[in-house]
Image (cartoon, helix red, strand yellow):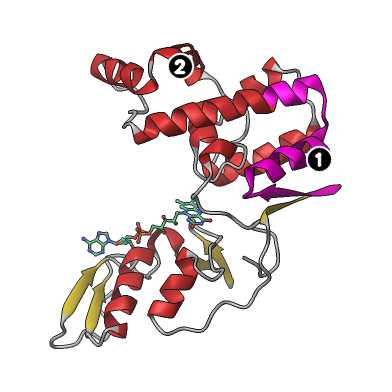
């Protein structure tokens, strides 16, 4: 894009994605003039869109979160002098399934209760959630310790075993498993509501269907709600299909 290039400016920002646009907006709010140089035909990057035959399509991001007071989004708006987003504060991610609404609470205890209420309090369900929680906690901690995935050689294997720690080494056997494998392991692959929720989250986090979603990557994703112990401090998310809310 080469529209409206000024002769001079204080700061040139390379890239008109979310980061570049937010940076330029922050700089302008501090009185600096900016130019954003974007290599693509439209701004937005991974949060952009394109038009075909009168319709517009998101290329990636569809959900903006954390616009409650004190949140990341709210802070950006305040810092660039924009009004707050109108909306209703939600207790967490709302998943609208065909026959039920499930709240993926930010509060860990509330989420533990909600998932048993919504999907069943059987021994299989409890064991499944406990398994996912353990994976999530372990691999979230390991990712903080610099775990390298996918494995690209012996050096990565040694590094990752060290990052996992001796007490969690057995969990490494799930590195090749999918979310579908985990459901099958607990006899829950045909539990339609549960699979429905997990499918939506898998699409949202690792962009794949449950039978192809890598279990570890999914469990350790910051926004995978089942990664309950790992989600503290991570971004809460709103259901993409929900009306304007945060
Ligand atoms: C499928 C998908 C779904 C997602 N869903 C969500 C979601 O729902 N919610 C959410 O919060 N996040 C989501 N994300 C993540 C989010 O879209 C990205 O984290 C975010 O948009 C990244 O912004 P960025 O500015 O850092 O990088 P980018 O969006 O990659 O922007 C970089 C820009 O720089 C330009 N550029 C690069 N090099 C040059 C150069 N040399 N000269 C000029 N221009 C250059 C590129 O063309 C691009 O426009 C999703 C991502 C994907 C891919």
Query: Considering depth in this image, is 51 or 161 the residue closer to the camera?
Result: 161
Task: Give the side of residue 137 with respect to residue 196, left or right.
Answer: left
Q: Give the labeled residue for mark 1.
A: 118
In this view, 30 is above or below 156:
below
The image's mark for residue 168 is: 2
User: Callout 1 environment at 10 Å: few (<14), some (14 to 19), or many (20+)?
Assistant: some
Residue 239 placement (x, y as % from top left): 66, 56
Total numbered circles: 2
Task: Check mark 2 vs ligand 1: CB closer than 8 Å? yes or no.
Answer: no
In this rendering, does residue 10 appear at all?
A: yes
* Residue at 28% in and 65% down: 15
Residue 52 placement (x, y as % from top left): 53, 67
User: Callout 2 environment at 10 Å: few (<14), some (14 to 19), or many (20+)?
Assistant: some
Within the magenta stretch, is there residue 109?
yes
Task: Give the side of residue 100 with respect to residue 221, left or right.
Answer: right
- Residues drawn in magenta: 99-128
Within the magenta stretch, is there residue 172?
no
Residue 173 placement (x, y as % from top left): 48, 13
Q: Secondary structure at mark 2?
A: helix
């Amino acid at each position: 894009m080469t529209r409206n290039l000024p002769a001079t400016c204080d700061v040139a920002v390379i890239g008109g994605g979310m980061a570049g646009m937010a940076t330029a907006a922050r700089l302008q709010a501090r009185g600096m003039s900016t130019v954003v140089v974007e290599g693509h035909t439209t701004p937005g990057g991974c949060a952009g869109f394109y038009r075909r035959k009168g319709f517009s399509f998101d290329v990636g991001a569809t959900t903006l979160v954390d616009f409650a007071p004190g949140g990341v989004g709210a802070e950006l708006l305040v810092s660039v002098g924009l009004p707050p987003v109108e909306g209703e504060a939600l207790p967490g991610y709302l998943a609208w399934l065909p026959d039920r609404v499930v709240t993926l609470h930010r509060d860990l205890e509330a989420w533990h209760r909600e998932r048993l209420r919504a999907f069943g309090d059987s021994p299989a369900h409890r064991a499944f959630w406990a398994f996912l929680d353990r994976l999530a906690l372990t691999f979230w901690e390991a990712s903080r310790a610099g775990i390298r995935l996918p494995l690209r050689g012996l050096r990565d294997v040694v590094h990752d075993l060290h990052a996992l720690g001796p007490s969690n080494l057995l969990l490494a056997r799930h590195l090749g498993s999918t979310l579908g494998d985990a459901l099958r392991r607990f006899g829950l692959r045909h539990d339609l509501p549960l699979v429905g929720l997990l499918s939506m989250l898998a699409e949202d986090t690792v962009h794949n269907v449950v039978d192809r979603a890598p279990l570890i990557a999914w469990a350790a994703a910051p926004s995978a709600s089942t990664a309950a112990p790992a989600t503290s401090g991570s971004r809460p998310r709103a259901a993409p299909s929900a009306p304007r809310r945060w």
